Amino acid sequence: MSGCGTDSPGGSHSGERELTCEESLARVYEYLDGELDSGEHEAVKDHLEKCRQCYPHYDFERLFLDYVHELGAGEESRPGLEERVREMLAAEPG
Amino acid sequence: MSIPAEPRQREFEDEALIHLDALYGLALRLSGGDEPRAEDLVQEAVLKAYRAWDRFEVGTNCRAWLMTILRNTFINQFRQQKTRPSPVEFEQIAERPSSDALYDADPEGRIFDRMIDDQVIAAIDELPDEFRIAVVLSDLEGLSYQEVAELMGIPVGTVKSRLFRARKRLQERLYDYAVEMGYLK
Ligand SMILES: [Zn+2]
C-alpha cells in the first residue's frame, strides 16, 4: 500500500493526524456500518474516498454490504404453520 | 379488568399473525435453514407474545415487538445449548486467513447484480452458528454492534471480528458460486 501519499504521519487534517491506508482499510466495515464516532468517521471517509489505492476496496465492500442489506431476513411461508399456531393459541388458557 | 379469552385471542391473531411469515423468515435465517427448528422457534415466540399481550400497547410497532421476542427466544435457546463443544468449523474460520479472491476477480462488484439470492442465503445458512448469528442480526436485521454484543453476551470487539470473518467467508463462497455458474473465470 504505497503511493497514495498518506502513509506518512503528521498530516494537518483539522489538527488530527491523517490515517494511513492500512488504518483506513482496517476500519472500512466500522465506517460502512456507521459505528465510528464522528471525528474518526470523517477521517476515514476523507481517506477512503480520496485515496486511489483504497477507494476500489472501499467501493467493493460498500456494494457487497448494500447487497446483503437489501436481501434482509425476508419473509418465508411454511405450510400449515398458521393453523398450528392458531391451535396452540386456542389450547392456551385465556 | 381481564378480557374474556376469545376476543383476546382474536385480537392477538388479527394483530400478530399477519407477521407470521416475517417471523418465520427470521427464524429460518437464525437457525441456518433448519425448518423444524425455525417452526419451534416461531411457536415459542408467538406463545410468549400471546402471554404478554396485555402488556403490548396497541398502535405501537407490533412487528418490531414480535421480532424482538423471537430474537431473544432464539438467543436464550442458543446460549443454553452452547455447552456442547464448539464445532470444528468455527475454529477453522476463526484461524484461517481470509482471501480476497472475489475482490481480485471482480473489484467492481458486478457479480452482486447477477447473483441468485437463494445462493447467497444458502451461503449465510452454512456459516458456523456464531458467525451466522452475527451476520443475520447485523446485516439482515440492522442491529448495531452494541445491540448484537448485548444479545449474544459477547464483547463489541468480538462482534467486529466475527462480522469481519463472516463477511470474508461469505465473499469466498460467493466467489465459488460465481465460478461454478460461469460468471467468473
Ligand atoms: Zn489509502
Image (cartoon, coloured by chain):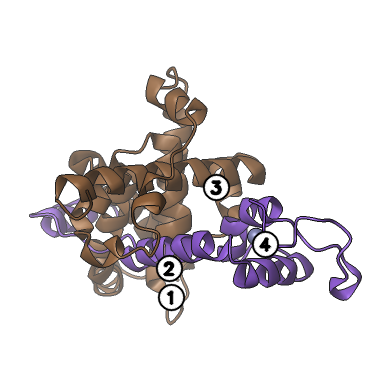
Distance between the Cα atoms at labels 4 and 1? 48 Å
**Residue at label 3?**
B151
Residue B35 located left or right of residue B166:
left
The span from disc 2 to disc 4 (Cα, nearest Å) is 45 Å
Q: Mark 1: which amino acid?
A: Asn
Q: Residue at x 51, y 47 (%)?
A: B163
**In the rendering, at what x and y percent does residue A75 appear?**
24, 64
Q: x, y percentage for residue B116?
A: 19, 59
Indicate whether B81 appears above or below A23. above
Mark 2 Cα shell of 10 Å, populated few (<14), some (14-19), many (≥20): few
Q: Specify whether tag 4 is near ligand 1 (CB below 8 Å).
A: yes
Which chain hosts label 4?
A
Task: Find chain A in the image and tell me its colour.
Answer: purple
Disc 4/disc 3 C-alpha distance (Å): 40 Å
Q: Nearer the viewer, residue B18 or A33?
A: A33
Asked whether, in this view, residue B112 is left or right of residue B70, the answer is left
Q: Which mark is residue B61?
A: 1
Amino acid under label 3?
Leu
Chain of the residue displaying label 3: B
Expressed as whole percent of the image width and height from the top left, the position of residue B126 reads 29, 38
Query: Closer to the camera, A6 or A25?
Result: A6
- The total number of labels drawn is 4
Mark 1 belongs to which subunit?
B
Could you tell me how far apart the alpha carbons at marks 2 and 3 are, in whole angstroms? 16 Å
Say which chain tag 2 marks: B
Residue farthest to the bottom? B59
**Colour for chain B in the figure:** brown
Q: Amino acid at mark 2?
A: Ala
Q: Which numbered marker is on residue B8?
A: none
Q: Which residue is mark 2?
A: B64
Q: Which mark is residue A4?
A: 4
